[in-house]
Amino acid sequence: MKKTLFVMLLLVFVFLTGCTTNSSSLNTETKKATVVNGTMKVHFIDVGQGDAILIQQGESTMLIDAGDNQYGETVVNYLKDQGVQTLDYVIGTHPHADHIGGLDVVINNFEVKKIIMPKVGHTTKTYEDLLLAIKNKGLKITTPVVGETNDLGDSQFTIIGPNAESYNSLNDYSVAIKLAYGNTSFVFTGDAEENAEKEMLALGIDLKADVLKIPHHGSSSSLSDAFLKAVAPKIGVIQLGADNDYGHPHEETMAKLAGVELYRTDNNGTVVIESDGTNLSVKTQKAGNDTSTANTQKVVQQENTATTADTGSYIGNINSHVYHTVTCSSLPLEKNRVYFDTEEEAIAAGYRPHEECNK
Ligand SMILES: [Zn+2]
Ligand SMILES: [Zn+2]
């Protein structure tokens, strides 16, 4: 309780002393009608087991995470396909490789105006590579300040985590934000676990949002009942890889999400949610197993790729996004195959190697 009070006081302080541009810091509590003219697009890029989210509003862009090391190029190519040249904000939620692994490649390829990362280090080569890329680009890391709101074009995002100086779990350091565009809103919390969720709830900020990036790839260590109830999303997106080593998404989490319109990058591929300020529309790269609102046009394209390129040295499974050597003993069904000439080509298309192939 003491801590809650402290955080509240801190917020009031931040609000009062408040930075010129942040006068709407706590306005998320009073959801007033906001008129917007354009659209905002949120792309949950399929990077297998990991997160990578591109947000575009007008000319402004933000990237949250960039998947594991091998997906750096995938993310760069995806951003280039969307016409991205400059990133106004890059958020590296926390130093785990499945979030920051591809960020060094992204930083090397685009102009980055601001990079936000939590104040915590990690002794991995992946993390060191990122720090080096930041340094070489002459960038400075901005530490997230909870309660601070920044504009991203006509949208605004408020930092809601991390709320403590130190945690036992690296996941709890995740930079978490609430993003609002017109009357629609999204919550992204990286891999934040129950402990960090509790602190976000204690902030007293209205966490209710239309869309929730399901925390921590659908792990049961995140998404407490209280947090889900507070966000009360209509739509949930889980970023994860097929047959991942962690058993994500966990059954307990899936059971909690029974009433939520759910998309998952292992089944749906890349998921794009567009907001016009009032309504949301969802497009998916693949139909997936359990959604009806998929973008059928893209599904057709996917099938064409599979039938026109009918020879290749590597065989990908269009459902799991895993690729195999032609001699692998567990190849996908004919109808689920896509062929690649090289492993690089497979990886660039967002596929990952089958662990058992080369044994
Ligand atoms: Zn993760
Ligand atoms: Zn993590």
Image (cartoon, helix red, strand yellow):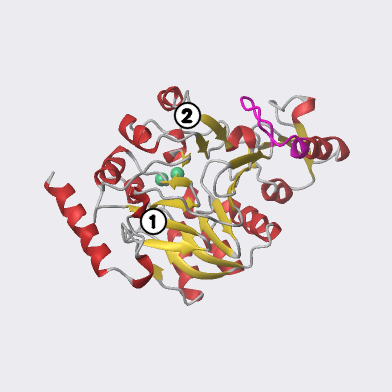
Q: Secondary structure at mark 1?
A: strand
Q: Is residue 277 visible?
A: yes
Left-right relation of 127 to 18: right
| Tag 1 residue | 158
**Magenta: main secondary structure:** loop
Q: Are marks 2 and 1 in contact (CB under 8 Å)?
A: no
Q: Nearer the viewer, mark 2 or mark 1?
A: 1
- In the rendered view, tell whether residue 227 sits above or below residue 204: above
| Tag 2 residue | 247
In percent of the image, x 35 and y 32: which residue is there? 229
Q: Position of residue 153 (x, y in %)?
A: 53, 63
Q: Position of residue 154 (x, y in %)?
A: 52, 61
Amino acid carrying mark 1 in the image: Thr
Quadrant showing the C terminus: top right
Residue 27: image quadrant is bottom left
Q: Position of residue 179 (x, y in %)?
A: 45, 52
Quarter of the picture for ligand 1? top left
**What's the magenta region?**
286-299
Q: Earlier in the sequence, mark 2 or mark 1?
A: 1
